[in-house]
């Protein structure tokens, strides 16, 4: 069973990045890169895509193929892998949508959080988010007890990496 080790400031900085998109009534996105050793996935980088390759809308967002290529190349440059993400939804919705499940990253143990209220409220506790993982060929919601066992906050700070993505 994998353990996700999150920097203490990861959630706060992720929400801060998504907030301007939510202010326009759009979903926001932040990507989490890290490395795995002995079943512990240590998130080290908060990757914040911006530019024409990131399209945001009220009920969905998308990355262009060129954006996906840039993000993939960035993992090599940073010597880590794309381990998870967070994106925002309207209102109290913290479940993954059908589009999220169908079009999301389909890699075992990929961590996907959903932030409510388009990231417009102060949220910093993991319990305020919908926590999901890709497991056995599908996404599933991670229970509160499983979150307590599998997600730990470390004293480390996350490294912010803004990345321009093209259309």
Image (cartoon, rainbow, N blue to C red):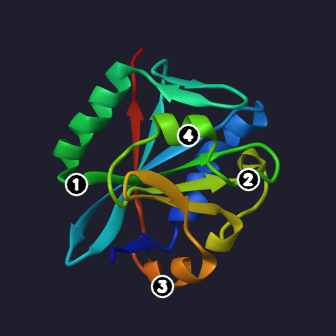
Calculate the distance from the C-alpha at mark 2 to the C-alpha at mark 3: 23 Å
Calculate the distance from the C-alpha at mark 1 to the C-alpha at mark 2: 28 Å
Q: Is residue 25 above or below residue 51?
A: below
Q: Which mark is first along the chain, 3 or 2?
A: 2
Calculate the distance from the C-alpha at mark 2 to the C-alpha at mark 4: 15 Å
Identify the residue under disc 3: 149
Do the residues under discs 2 and 3 have CB atoms within 8 angstroms? no
Tell me residue 41's x, y (percent).
31, 69
Residue at image coords 25%, 40%: 74
Residue at image coords 50%, 74%: 8
Mark 4, Cα crowd under 10 Å, few <14 / some 14-19 / many 20+, is some
Q: Secondary structure at mark 1?
A: loop
Tell me residue 14's x, y (percent).
56, 54
Q: Is residue 63 above or below residue 93?
A: above
Residue at image coords 62%, 53%: 114
Q: Which mark is first along the chain, 1 or 4?
A: 1
In this orientation, which residue lies closer to the viewer: 83 or 79? 83
Do the residues under discs 2 and 4 have CB atoms within 8 angstroms? no
Identify the residue under disc 2: 116
Please state, as top left, top right, bottom left or bottom right, where the C terminus lies in the image: top left
Q: Is residue 104 left or right of residue 120?
A: left
Q: Is residue 72 left or right of residue 116?
A: left
Identify the residue under disc 4: 100
Q: Which mark is first along the chain, 1 or 3?
A: 1
Calculate the distance from the C-alpha at mark 4 to the C-alpha at mark 3: 25 Å
Q: In the image, which is nearer the foreground, mark 3 or mark 1?
A: 3
Q: In the image, which is nearer the foreground, mark 1 or mark 2?
A: 2
Q: Secondary structure at mark 2?
A: loop
Mark 1, Cα crowd under 10 Å, few <14 / some 14-19 / many 20+, is some
Give the number of marks.
4
């Amino acid at each position: 069973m994998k353990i996700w080790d999150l920097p203490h400031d990861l959630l706060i900085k992720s929400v801060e990045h998504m907030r301007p998109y939510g202010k326009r009534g759009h979903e926001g996105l932040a990507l989490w890169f890290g490395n795995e050793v002995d079943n512990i996935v240590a998130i080290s980088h908060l990757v914040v895509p911006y530019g024409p390759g990131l399209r945001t809308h009220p009920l969905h967002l998308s990355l262009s193929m060129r954006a996906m290529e840039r993000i993939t190349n960035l993992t090599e440059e940073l010597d880590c892998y794309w381990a998870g993400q967070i994106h925002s939804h309207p209102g109290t919705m913290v479940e993954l949508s059908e589009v999220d499940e169908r079009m999301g990253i389909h890699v075992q143990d990929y961590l996907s959080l959903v932030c409510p209220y388009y990231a417009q409220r102060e949220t910093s506790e993991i319990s305020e988010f919908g926590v999901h993982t890709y497991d056995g060929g599908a996404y599933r919601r991670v229970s509160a007890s499983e979150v307590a066992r599998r997600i730990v906050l470390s004293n480390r700070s996350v490294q912010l990496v803004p990345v321009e993505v093209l259309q």
